[in-house]
Image (spheres, rainbow, N blue to C red):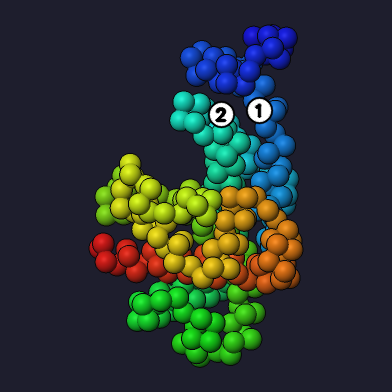
Amino acid sequence: MNEQVMASSTEEELWKKYRNKKDPSIRDYFVKKYAPLVKYVAGKVAVGKPQNVEFDDLVGYGVFGLFDAIEKFDPEKHVKFKTYAVTRIRGSIFDELRSIDWVPRSVRQKSREVEETISNLEAQLGRAANDDEIARAMHITVDDFQELMFKISGTSIMSINDVWHGSEENDKVSIIDNIEAPSSLNPEMIVEKDEIKKIIIQAINDLPEKEKKVLVLYYYEDLTLKEIGQVLSVTESRVSQLHTKAIMRLRARLLNVKKGIA
């Protein structure tokens, strides 16, 4: 298809044509159009990552996600391609980071320790544990706990992209796919998905208000940590800490549910 015809067609028309004929010229058009989206996602992922993780490498990993999104996008599902592509691009980047094992072992161990502590505490308390309670359970000071949150903040963004498995192999839901607008965070509105999705959304609803707001602003509204800090009138480092605690709390809650399912 020549460029003049593509320029005169709506994007919806192009998607339908691509779905039917898989015209490589249309695919190339979408790759070119949405290439800046890959750099945007890579830029967000790059925040807080070690220096050995190069931005250009992240972009390269993300391109695979863009190709995957273009191949699998279904315009009839009434989801914007940009929204769909961001998830696929981010997932592709983290898949590659996971495969090269970029997280230091000591940081990963501490992350698991915090997650297990929160899991045990909240199972006992029946509510969200506060910083003092978590620090006490870990036999460290609150200041040390805050410092620990900063150290593992780079791993928490990857953690939210993990796929959570239920009791059946086909019960697979990504936490990040369920972070939606505040008005949509209602399990009863989910009618077509199984119990896992409801559990994830309920876990998000049960987060302390500031932590939930950070997740929504970061993943749904696409604000940067600095912009979120301005909205909440806190420092960027405080936003990073809130984000990390939110992810730790979510994963701890799902760990408890998983124990119940198993």
**Secondary structure beneath disc 1?**
helix
Mark closer to the chain start, 1 or 2: 1
The local crowd at label 1, few if under 14, some if 14 to 19, many if 20 or more residues have their Cα within 10 Å, is some
Q: Residue at x 54, y 38 (%)?
A: 84
Q: In the image, is residue 153 above or below residue 191? A: below
Q: In the image, is residue 40 above or below residue 25? A: below
Q: Position of residue 37 (x, y in %)?
A: 68, 39
Q: Residue at x 73, y 9 (%)?
A: 4
What amino acid type should be assigned to the residue bearing mark 1?
Val
Q: Which residue is mark 1?
A: 31
Disc 1 to disc 2, how far (Cα)? 8 Å
- Residue sitting at the far front: 183
Counting labels gives: 2
Based on the displayed image, in which of its 4 quarters is residue 106 positioned? bottom right
Q: In the image, is residue 95 above or below residue 48? A: above
Q: Position of residue 56 (x, y in %)?
A: 73, 45
Horizontal arrangement in the rendering, residue 152 relative to residue 113 (left or right): right
> Where, quadrant-wise, is the C terminus in this rendering?
bottom left
Q: Position of residue 91 (x, y in %)?
A: 54, 46
Horizontal arrangement in the rendering, residue 148 relative to residue 250 (left or right): right
Q: Nearer the viewer, residue 184 or 151?
A: 184
Q: Residue at x 67, y 32 (%)?
A: 34
Q: Is residue 173 visible?
A: yes
Q: Position of residue 115 (x, y in %)?
A: 46, 72
Q: Which residue is mark 2?
A: 70
The local crowd at label 2, few if under 14, some if 14 to 19, many if 20 or more residues have their Cα within 10 Å, is many
Horizontal arrangement in the rendering, residue 44 relative to residue 200 (left or right): right
Q: Nearer the viewer, residue 110 or 177?
A: 177
